[in-house]
Image (cartoon, coloured by chain):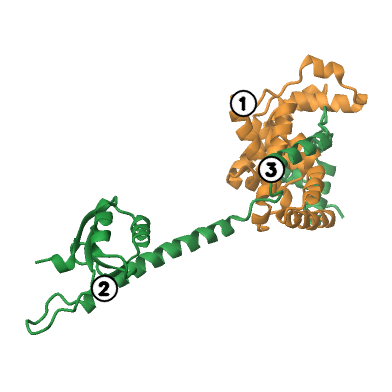
Amino acid sequence: MRTTVNPGVDCPHAWELMPWVLQDSAAREQAAWLENHLAGCASCRAEFAQQSRLRLALSLPSERPLDAEVGLQRLLARLDASDPQQAPRQPRSRVWLVRALAAAVVAQAVGLGVLGVKLDAVENPAYRTLSETPSPMPPGAIRVVPDTGMTLADWNALLHTLRLQVVHGPNSVGAYTVVPTDTAATTGQILPKLRAARGIRLAEPISATP
Amino acid sequence: MNEADTDAEVIDRLLLQRMATGDRAALATLYRSYHGRLCRFLSRLTRRSDVIEEVVNDCFWIAWQKAGEFRGDSRVSTWIMGIAYRCGLKALRQHGDEPVEYEMSTDERLVSSDPDEDRELRDWLGKGLEHLSADQRVVIELVYGVGHSLDDVAAIMQCPLGTVKARLFYARVKLRNVLPALAGNPVACKEGTS
């Protein structure tokens, strides 16, 4: 049964529905309503016919179709050229995971450094009683003050090269106490090397300190 | 989305999953499946074949790289068309010009080998689309040519739904005013409805 058609009144709604009815995505009731409206409205019928023709024209393949196989071969060649792994880039989340792990390692290193300084402060209080005997220094101990610009890597490399071990420090002025791990090495042999090393501001034998 | 669309979507998602693992056969299948519609879609932005081919490959290059990041928030077709649209705009900027004028060259008309009916339809469409802006042509293509919803088009063009509605509305009004005359019919008098 057809409902009453109100040309002019219902036309805006019919106009809105046309693309979706043509797409076959409108609800069945909407399509039926439009069909009913078109039956009684010449203007919308003409418009719908034109829309149908428009859709037909737009669905025609390209005038000068490109060869998909040629394009695909170019794409694959491009992948070969820039992606020797022949695999898509790993999802960004995995990249971020690696970065996060690296950041965690750095944070851990910084934390250990801070913790070390605090522990050192606890073990060596800022004051001591006159009756308290100072902790004895191991033989061959040398006080070393590295330059503030010296990297940790350079410092470690120097200690490794000269076979030294840090037994104390850094204190409030950034001085470390080092001792030779090689018992055969004498302070006299090590001192010139330390003083000649790049990044060392001061190197003095502790026993010689007045 | 009808049943055929649902099936196509399931297949597309499987292909994307395989692409994410580096499966080139899946890439080739998806490429062949989308090549025709992408070329037609991009031809609404530019008529230069070399640019269209470049953009299609840029689009699939990105799809290959980002297949693992597809979360299924939209249909695969919406996702791919969106990439193609953005690649198309970028290519046009790189080529240093506005979207290429949408008009058929004399040569193109002469060398056309289509059946008469198709050629007549193409001419009619081509002349009608000349009256639209590039964005309006894209919306018309996506709605009438590809069959996307307004929401899909908004996602593809990354603009508000209202903007898409406005583009579609004004494009339809313009076409209604010029297409009948191009087809040899009197120009429609009605100036659009709201």
Task: Provide residue B166's location: percent of width, then percent of height.
Answer: 62, 39
Say above or below: B181 vs B161: above
- The reply to the same-chain question for discs 2 and 1 is no
Q: Secondary structure at mark 2?
A: helix
Q: In which quadrant of the rendered image does the N terminus of chain A lie?
A: bottom right
Residue at far left of view: A130
Mark 1 — residue?
B95
In this view, the mark in front (3 or 2)? 2
Is there CB contact under 8 Å for labels 3 and 2? no
| Residue sitting nearer the eye, B49 or A195 | A195
Determine the CA span between mark 2 and mark 1: 62 Å
Q: In the image, which lettered chain appears orange?
A: B
Residue type at mark 1?
His
Residue type at mark 3?
Trp
- The reply to the same-chain question for discs 3 and 2 is no
Reading the chain from its start, which is encountered first: label 1 or label 3? Answer: 3
Residue at mark 2: chain: A
Residue at mark 3: chain: B
Task: Provide residue A77's location: percent of width, then percent of height.
Answer: 74, 38
Determine the CA span between mark 3 and mark 2: 54 Å
Q: In the image, which lettered chain appears green?
A: A
Residue B191 placement: quadrant? top right
Residue type at mark 2?
Lys
Determine the CA span between mark 1 and mark 3: 19 Å
Mark 2 — residue?
A118
- Name the disc covering residue B61, or none: 3
Q: Residue at x 62, y 56 (%)?
A: A91
Give neighbour class at mark 2: few <14, some 14-19, many 20+ (Cα, 10 Å).
few
